[in-house]
Image: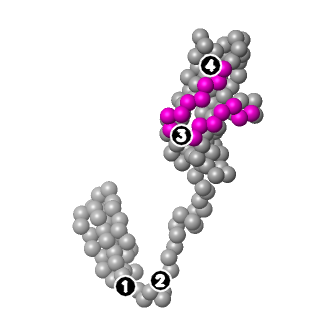
Amino acid sequence: MITVAADSDRMESFEQRTNAQFDDVTVDGIVGEATRTMPTAEYEYRDLFAERGSEPSQPRAGVGIDVHSASHTVSVTLISSDTADRVEIREDGEVRGELIEVGQTATLEYDAGALGTITVVAISGTEAAVIAIKSYAF
């Protein structure tokens, strides 16, 4: 076990608590180290992350969204794919475009007077996460 404290006064407490449980305890300033030897048959690995319960991370990606009022278009560019396999551009529950490669751009065209909201969703396997929402009005 290794511990680091904000000040050396706290290391005295570490030394007192660990002396009974460990073979060797050393303190050097604000760093303490405690070691012990045990038979491998008695060793049990504890996965502290699994004990807390972990959920798979959501897909992540970076996009740029530009609304061009003069041309009545919205451009979505995939800037980084991070953990996403692809990015979907959705509007009113419909997939309007898909970006797979970094640097790829999708341009959506609209009529004058159109208004709405675009939702960009990162997809990785069966996982999906909303990464951007942009409203437009022409």
Please tell me which residue is depicted at 52% across the width and 67% down the height of the picture: 48
Q: What secondary structure is the magenta-colored segment mainly?
A: strand
At label 4, the amino acid type is Thr
Asked if 55 appears above or below 135 in the picture, the reply is: below
Q: Nearer the viewer, mark 2 or mark 3?
A: 3
| Disc 2 to disc 1, C-alpha distance | 10 Å
For mark 2, what is the residue? 43
Magenta part of the protein: which range?
94-109
Q: Badges 3 and 4: C-beta atoms under 8 Å apart?
A: no
Identify the secondary structure beneath mark 1.
loop
Closer to us: mark 4 or mark 2? Answer: 4
* Nearer the observer, 49 or 68: 68
Element class at badge 4 = strand
Viewed as shown, does residue 33 lie left or right of 74? Answer: left
Give the residue drawn at x 42%, y 89%. 39
**Residue under circle 3?**
101
Residue 97 image point, x, y percent: 66, 33
From the image, state whether disc 3 or disc 4 is nearer to you.
3
| Residue 116 point in image, percent of width and height | 71, 22
Q: Hey, what amino acid is under mark 2?
A: Tyr
Is label 4 in contact with label 2 (beta carbons under 8 Å)? Answer: no
Q: Is residue 48 above or below residue 90?
A: below
Graded by Cα atoms within 10 Å as few (under 14), some (14 to 19) or many (20 or more), the crowding at tag 4 reads: some
Residues at marks 3 and 4, CA–CA distance in whole angstroms = 21 Å
Return the disc, 2 or 1, that comes first in the chain's sequence: 1
Q: Label 3's element?
A: loop
